[in-house]
Image (spheres, grey):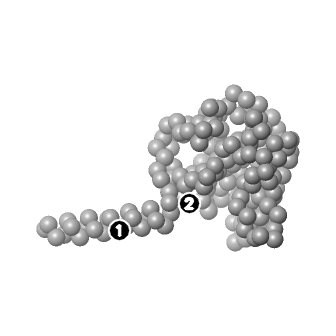
Amino acid sequence: MVQSWRRLLAVLLVVALAGCVAGGYTLVEPGRTQIDEEFSISSNMAWSQRAFGERHVWTINGAGLEAIWFYAGIEDGDALIAQIDEDEDVPRFDADMRPNEVMELVVDSIGLIGAVNVEGTGLRPAEFGSVKGYRFELTLQTKEGLIKRGLAVGTIQEDRLQLIVYLAADLHYYDKYVDEVERIFASVEMI
């Protein structure tokens, strides 16, 4: 009996460690969460999070199906994505960008990571916490043909871009989480 428990414990430990090494994700419990030193948000759901410097991605079923990307404190000259090819110019944030240019930055960045037919539409003023910002919708198709929809809300404060982008498979996942994403957008508090 003791050996059975030891085997079970060993198997569970191996599975847990494999998950940590392979994914690098951590659990974000429901409630208020600080995104770097820039802003905080509140969620009613548990998410899995992975951080890439000032960039954080939250997902429930995997980033290929749905994901919320948090870009906190992106500075003048920084890119939203890592440079993939040395010869390719990666679009970079400019502190003087207008909202339509930020939308283009997002669209161009998504296109460089393999999406096609990327479009940003519906640009309009919106609040980002207590400050003036903007929001827009996104549509795209992956290389594999999966159609995705998305929402983005952002602002430029003190020459730094604060941006939240939600992207999800149009079939099922977008509608399943969009209400929670809207709650997250509405919960933004600047730090």
Q: Residue at position x 21%, y 67% from top?
A: 6
Q: Which mark is residue 62?
A: 2
The x and y percentages for residue 7 are 23, 70
Location of the N terminus by quadrant is: bottom left
- Determine if residue 141 is in view: no
* Tag 1–tag 2 contact (CB < 8 Å): no
Q: Residue at position x 86%, y 47% from top?
A: 101
Residue type, label 1: Val
Image position of 55 with respect to 30: above or below: below
Query: Of residues 170 and 89, which is closer to you in this image?
Result: 89
Q: Is residue 19 left or right of residue 119?
A: left
Residue type, label 2: Gly
Front position among marks 1 and 2: 1
Q: Quadrant of residue 167?
A: bottom right
The x and y percentages for residue 63 are 60, 59
Q: Is residue 91 left or right of residue 182?
A: right
Location of the C terminus by quadrant is: top right
Query: Of residues 184 and 175, which is closer to you in this image?
Result: 184
Label 1, secondary structure: give it: helix
Q: Quick one: label 1 or label 2, which is nearer the N terminus? A: 1
To which residue does mark 1 refer? Answer: 14
The x and y percentages for residue 144 are 70, 72
Q: Is residue 50 left or right of residue 17?
A: right
Give the farthest residue toward the top.
130
Give the farthest residue toward the left.
1
Total count of labels: 2
Q: CA distance from mark 1 to mark 2?
A: 21 Å
